[in-house]
Amino acid sequence: MSRGVSRLLRPRLALLNGAAAAGGCLLAAEGGWGMLPWVAWAGVALLAAGGSALNQVLERDLDGLMERTRQRPLPRGDISPAAAALVGAACIAAGLLALGAMGGLLPPFIGGGALGWYLAVYTPLKRRTSLALLAGAVSGAAPPLVGWTLAGGNPADYRIVLLAGILYLWQIPHFWLLQRRHAEDYRRAGIPLFVEGVKDGARSPIFAVWLGALVSGALLLPVFGIVGGVAAAGLSAFSLFLLMAAFFRADGALFSSLNLFPLLILLALSIQR
């Protein structure tokens, strides 16, 4: 049962979303690692975990068709849809309460809105069009904004707009490589690939444009003085590594590195603060 709950909540992905929220909080907070970044991390991680559970309830038919997801608890019959929905709702309620208790109405409103967008817009849209990712990435860009507003930051501030934009750009090449790994699974389930050229991986010119935009956005952090010193040097080196991996068509190394990108941003902001 515990393994089934873990597959339902996908804690690694949930914690990655929480890390992005903590990064936004650190960007706004002057005191560094106090209580607020941890609340942002926990609150958004709970929202992401709950969203994963509800997403699996909605997509249990597709999950049963894909090799990558057929071992999830709903296709296996380990957990009923009603029980999964209850677990997901409990996680979401806990996350919203934690954010609201520490930050007022705006952080849970943004977090809840992003989650609603993910479930009500992206989830059904991905069955119909390969461009669904461009809409769904909006939800993935929201966690740093939740953390920023939790610390009292103005959501229109250019610094958080830049950070959220970077997280938006990151999702496209990351998911592109994920689709390439599991292209047959997606075709079997009838889910349109982002582009048919996904089979070319890092060799695709369109992929190169998205990766170049991501690297350019990341390098704007030191340009605008948001990170500096060791953090800026590390971020620059990592960005160069991404470009080199793409140039040499090392899709495996590139995918693994992109997995770490939100954590690198959090580390850079932690050092900076």
Image (cartoon, grey):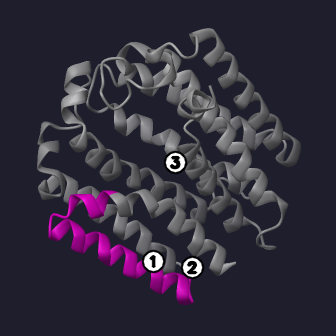
Residue at the spot x=40%, y=80% of the render?
A: 236
**Rounded to the nearest whole Å, what is the CA distance between mark 1 and mark 2?**
9 Å
**Overall secondary structure of the magenta stretch?**
helix
Give the camera-side residue of 266 and 70. Answer: 70
Above or below residue 133? Residue 87 is: above
Relative to 230, is 85 above or below?
A: above
Q: Amino acid at mark 2?
A: Val
Q: Which residue is mark 1?
A: 235
Residue 164 seen from this side: yes
Residue 14 in picture, x, y percent from top left: 59, 43
Q: Is residue 257 above or below residue 70?
A: below
Magenta stretch, residue numbers: 226-255
Could you say whether the residue bearing mark 3 is in a helix, strand or loop?
A: loop
Mark 3 and mark 2 lie on one chain; the one further toward the N terminus is 3
Viewer-nearest of discs 3 and 1: 1
User: The residue under label 3 is which amino acid type?
Assistant: Ala
Residue tagged 3:
141
